[in-house]
Image (spheres, rainbow, N blue to C red):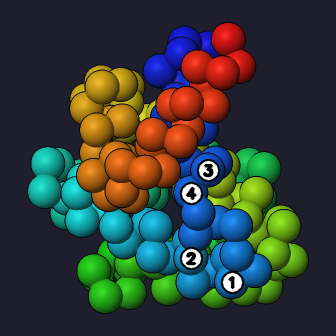
Amino acid sequence: MDTNDLLRHQIIKNLPLLQTKKIPDAAVLIWEQMATQIISIVGEGGFNSLYSRSLVLTQSSYFWLEFDPHSTQAEHRFAELKMCLERQTPAHANEANLQLLITFTDILASLIGEQLTTSILRLAWDYDAADSASKEIKCAR
């Protein structure tokens, strides 16, 4: 795995919002922040396609992640994700959401490149989270 992959994955794993017990609410906020940035680049249809594909791939490990591919209206886009996460323990919900985020960003990076994907994540989730992840990776070397 390339260092850029590790940086992107570390950014996701170190999101401060995911350190809370309210995983479903935090997950929706994180997805909304990211969606805003990505939609401005690939459009709503592009985002919805990436999100649906990520859910399908993540369902192989988390079968309880249900979704309706036709329910992609902006105001309800993450309602099913939230309901699915609410039915799980906080630890299990967090694990599934992390995998979903990583799967989504892996697909995105394969399409638009690692640098642009990491830049989008930094914009969506604030530079501080990205910088702390970067420092942790440098220390680990």
- The type of residue carrying mark 3 is Asn
Which residue in the structure is indicated by mark 2?
26
Question: Is the residue 40 above or below the residue 31 in the image?
Answer: above
Neighbor class of circle 2 (other Cα within 10 Å; few <14, some 14-19, many 20+) is some
State the CA–CA distance, disc 4 to disc 2: 10 Å
Q: Nearer the viewer, mark 4 or mark 2?
A: 4
Which of the 4 image quadrants contains residue 88? bottom right
Q: Which residue is mark 1?
A: 22
Instruction: Tell me the quarter of the picture where residue 25 sits.
Output: bottom right
Q: CA distance from mark 2 to mark 1?
A: 6 Å
Left or right: 57 as drawn, with respect to 69 = right
List x then y, in percent, for residue 76: 38, 87
Which of 72/122 is in front? 122
Tell me how many marks there are.
4
Tell me if mark 1 has few (under 14), some (14-19) or many (20+) residues whose alpha carbon lies within 10 angstroms of its own. Answer: some
Q: Could you say which disc has been placed on residue 15 in the image?
A: 4
Label 4 is placed on what type of residue?
Leu
**Residue drawn 54% across and 16% down?**
3
The percent position of residue 9, horizontal first and vertical second, equals: 57, 37
Does residue 122 appear to the left or right of 1 in the view shown? Answer: left
Reading the image, the residue beneath label 3 is 14
Secondary structure at numbered mark 2: helix
User: Residue 124 vs residue 51: left or right?
Assistant: left
Q: Residue at x 58, y 19 (%)?
A: 138
Residue 68: where, in percent of width, then height?
Answer: 49, 75
Q: Of the residues tagged 3 and 1, which is closer to the observer?
A: 3
Q: Earlier in the sequence, mark 4 or mark 2?
A: 4
* CB within 8 Å, label 3 to label 4: yes
